[in-house]
Image (cartoon, coloured by chain):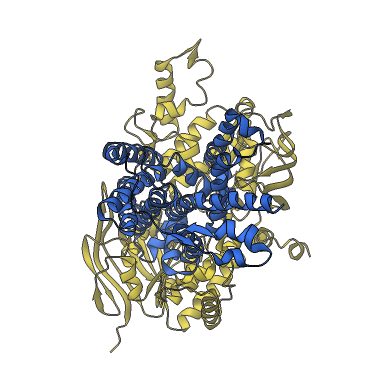
Chain colours: A blue, B yellow
Amino acid sequence: MDETLIFIFTIIGAGLRTGTPLLFATSGALINERAGVLNLGVEGMMLVGALGGFAISYATGNPWLGVAGGMLAGGILSILHGFVSISLRGDQVVSGLALVFMGRGITSVFGSRYVEIRDVPRLPTIELPFMKSIPVIGESILDPLFGSQNIVFYIGLLTVPAVWFLINRTRPGLYMRAVGDYPAAADSVGINVLGQRYLWVFVGGLFAGLAGASLSLAITPLWIEDLTAGQGWIAVGLVIFASWNPWRAALGAYIFGALRRMPLDLQAVAWLPFASNPILGVWLDMIPYLFTILALVISSREATRQRLGAPLALGQPYVRGERGL
Amino acid sequence: MTAEYAVQMRGITKRFPGVVANDNVSFEVKRGEIHALLGENGAGKSTLMNMLGGLYRPDQGEITINGEAVYFSSPRDAIKKGIGMVHQHFMLVPTQTVAENMVIGASTGFWLSPKKLYADIAAVSERYNLPIAPDAKIWQLSVGEQQRVEILKTLYLGAKILIMDEPTAVLTPQEVEKMFVTLREMTKNGHTIIFISHKLDEVLSIADRITVLQKGKVSANVAAKDVNKAELAKLMVGREVLFRIDKEAAKPKDDVLVLKNVSANNDRGLPALRSLSLNVRAGEIVGIAGVSGNGQHELAETLTGLRHVTDGVIEINNTGIQNQPPLAAIDQKVAHIPADRNGMGSAPTLSLSDNLIMKSYRAAPVRKGWRLLNAVARNTSEDLIKQYNVATPSIDVEARLLSGGNLQKLILAREISAEPTSIVAVTPTRGLDVGATEAVHQRLISERDRGAAVLLISEDLDELLSLSDRILVMYEGQIVGELPPDEDRIDEIGLLMAGGVQEAQA
């Protein structure tokens, strides 16, 4: 009985860990979407964040510098999207897609020399041995969940309320929501709509970079081409699934983290068909992508989007009324 | 000495590509007065006020506030000088609370504590005697309440001079009365109000002084008590204006357009029409009155096949057309004059000729087999342009380049030349100047006299009263009353529009 419990919670614990980069990426995408800018380039920004973080950590020996560098790399790439979609008023979908290809290309060219490296300085894991000694639930539940988690997991836990607070209880958050829902109203009281949008696109890029760096420096601490394996896309889908709410985004990120991780863990269970038949595992692997496609299809319908509570001006460039109005 | 004038704008000129919106305009407002700025659409009222509000900068001229010369580079500068603008399209974020909308322009610090905000706002609302729930979301409020929030917002930001851009356009007659009371109280407290409008009666009843703009120039500056409606109209338009349309009594015949217990949802999937029934007979104009957003939009779309119904029957010429493609309605000769001229009424980047044959291309003479006969299409188009007085250099011009009035004439030409059995017209004269409005009204009347069944959906009560043979009032997706187009019963219509069924019938 205890063994089963430990096994179940070990899987959940691993899911929480795997879900953490997804949590960062989703939070970031949520922030720039709340400001009215759709950025489909999360995958590309995660990739440059992952490689940037990895390379800087390797060069300097300090994984925290790596994290900072990875975030900046994601942020810089996002500014490009900002320029096209905010200043040039280009199509945000196309520009976001271009960002993905760019991120892939850049990391594929500059990343090849890092592929063989296995000894990059990593972010620390926090061991909490006292978890085991807590009576009743300690050994079977708390320890497999929290006994040995990387520090990014805890940063992730803090991010959720912080993002919620930023959006709902601070003045910058008020500006973010105003330029995302009704930019003309913000403009009429003297708020710099374009500046605000740049700011939040950049913040979204920082988060995507953090997501990438936490992958390459903590969750799967190595660099391979296409390390993110579609997680950026899942983040884009999750924002919709979460109705642009950070708490629901976190829930979704953890669920999908678990789903991602599970096929790996379940292969060890003899009585499940997955153990003996790898083909079935492939089907489990598909779930996140199927979900993403579904989410994008649903969200592309204007009517459905309204019902789900999308920011009203999402995807629309802001142009001050030329005449009249 | 404090300056006598709250606002002085002297020699203001503002050019936009291709137009001089304001040509050497001088505009002065005394402190504590209600000053109306009157003019047709496109006369330059909004441009002038946007310069006072800091959205635009004048090319020439100077602005002084309370005797002090000012240069605004953004709305924030204007707000600092005590100028507040209540826009016609409310500048409120619908998903945010009243309190959030009010503090967004203020500087109250980094953290936003709802409790403190609500207390602050409640205090302001009490001080100015404008009751409002600070925690309500904007989308939950009626249009009148939203306007109250807009006014409160500018007061909260310290406005002493209020610019109100066509504030009555969206209100019921009762709400207008209430707002006028509020405005008079505000002037007693030392506020100055600039009231932008093109409605003569309103201006005469609220303003102390009136400045009239015509084609970007000041045509008059008079005290309200010294002018009458006809004189003002002449100053505004530059010629005599007919206020009443001459029309004979309707001679209605058989039912053409019949809705029985029709229900439909809006874009959000919520019920917009609730078991609505109505009929329009050949040879009459039935007006639909109602505050915008009570299902009028959805009503027009179900009638023209653009929206599915969840229940009920729509019959046109005794043929059911509900839940069929728009073509079914077109085949029954339903003409549609949509509210959205650029999006739905025309294809902005196609030529006038293409726009004109958009309904007739399917049949001879424009069609021959699988081909379109270009020469025929062009001839037909040339004829229509002449017949309907569309001002354009050629039929090859893109439709988007037409002015609002000309575009509406183009749409009328296409729709009416097909000799429809019924016409669904939605706010057909919104944004049109007096001349174009007259033309549209005459067309609708002559179509009625030809025997078409006309359903006129409008937010302009004057238009409904002068055109309709019967008025139906729509509220929350239902017809809540039918009245004759009698000016004396305008209060009753207003009450019904606001949902006061019981009061109105009692």
Looking at the image, residue B230 lies above or below residue B8: above
Looking at the image, residue B458 lies above or below residue B50: above
Q: Residue B213 or B181: which is nearer the viewer?
A: B181
Image location (x, y in percent) of residue B159: 40, 76
> Can the viewer see residue B426?
no
Quarter of the image with the C terminus of chain A is bottom left
- Determine the residue located farthest toward the top in the rendered image: B369
Q: Residue B57 or B212: which is nearer the viewer?
A: B57
Image location (x, y in percent) of residue A208: 40, 51
Looking at the image, residue B87 lies above or below residue A244: below
> Can the viewer see residue B271?
yes
Q: How many numbered callouts?
A: 0
Q: Residue B42 or A305: which is nearer the viewer?
A: A305
Q: Quadrant of residue B449?
A: top right
Q: Is residue A207 left or right of residue B133?
A: left
Question: Residue at the location (45% across, 28% down)?
Answer: B356
Image location (x, y in percent) of residue B403: 38, 42
Q: Is residue A143 left or right of residue B382?
A: right
Image location (x, y in percent) of residue B195: 43, 68
Q: Quadrant of residue B352?
A: top left
- Determine the residue located farthest toward the bottom in the rendered image: B1
- Determine the residue located farthest toward the right in the rendered image: B506
